[in-house]
Image (spheres, rainbow, N blue to C red):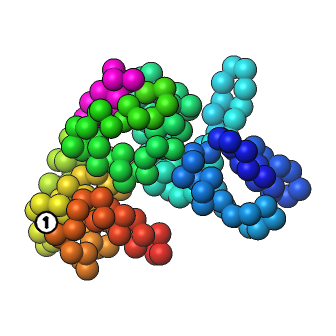
Amino acid sequence: MKEPGAVVIECGGVGYKCLATMNTLRMVPAVGEKTMLYTHMLVREDAVELCGFADRSELNCFKLLMNISGVGAKSAIAVLSEFTPEQMAVAVSSGDSKSLTRAAGVGNKLAQRIVLELKDKVKNIAPVMAASVAAAPVIMPDGNISKAIGALAVLGYSPDEVTPFMTNIDPNLPVEKIIGETLKAIGKK
C-alpha cells in the first residue's frame, strides 16, 4: 500500500510502514506485487520508524545526510525526493547549495552545511583514492570520469569499486550520465 511519503511492505504476514522518498515510491510496483526495499531503522525516545529505499545508493546517501548536524529524517527524505543520489552528489561536488534549497524544509544555511560537510568527506576520501591509484596499475582518469568517481565517493563507493564499471563509458558524457551508467552497471552485478 502506498501513501504520500510512505509505503507499507508486507513481510511474513506483518505490514511494515516505511517512510520513503518520491523516487522510491515511483519504483514500488502495484499492490500485491513483490518488491524489496533497503531499510534504515530510526530509533527515538518517542518512536521507532523504518525508512525504505529502492536502491543502495539512495540508502547510502540518506545515511550521509543523517550524519549532518541539523538534518533529520524528514529533511534527508525531502532532499532525496527532490534529487536522485547522482544529482545530489553532483550538486555537492560542484558546490551548488542553491539547488539543494528546492527540497522542502531545506533553507540556505542547511543547504550550505550539507555541501560543506559532504565535500569534506570527499576530501577525506581523496588521499585514499590517490593511494589506491598509486598501488594499482590503473591510471586515475581525468575530467568527467574523475568528477564522477568523486561524486560516487560521496555515496560511499570506493574508487576501486567503481572504476572497473567505467571502462566502457564515454568520458565525454556529462558527469550525471557517467554516474547513472556506473550505478546501473553496479546494480546489474
x and y percentages locating residue 98 in the rendered image: 29, 32
Which sits in the foreground, 104 or 32?
Answer: 104
Q: Residue at x 30, y 64 (%)?
A: 177
Which sits in the foreground, 60 or 136?
Answer: 60
Q: Is residue 109 magenta?
A: yes
Q: Residue at x 53, y 38 (%)?
A: 77
Q: Find the magenta span and give its range.
A: 107-120
Q: Given the image, on which type of amino acid does mark 1 rest?
A: Pro
Q: Within the image, what quadrant is residue 42 found in? A: top right
Secondary element at tag 1? loop
Secondary structure that dominates the magenta span:
helix
Crowd tier of the residue under label 1, counting other residues whose Cα lies within 10 Å: few below 14, some 14–19, many 20 or above: few
x and y percentages locating residue 56 in the rendered image: 50, 56
Left or right, 90 with respect to 57, comes to left
From the viewer's perspective, is residue 172 above or below residue 92? below
Q: Within the image, what quadrant is residue 61 found in? A: top left
Q: Which residue is mark 1?
A: 141
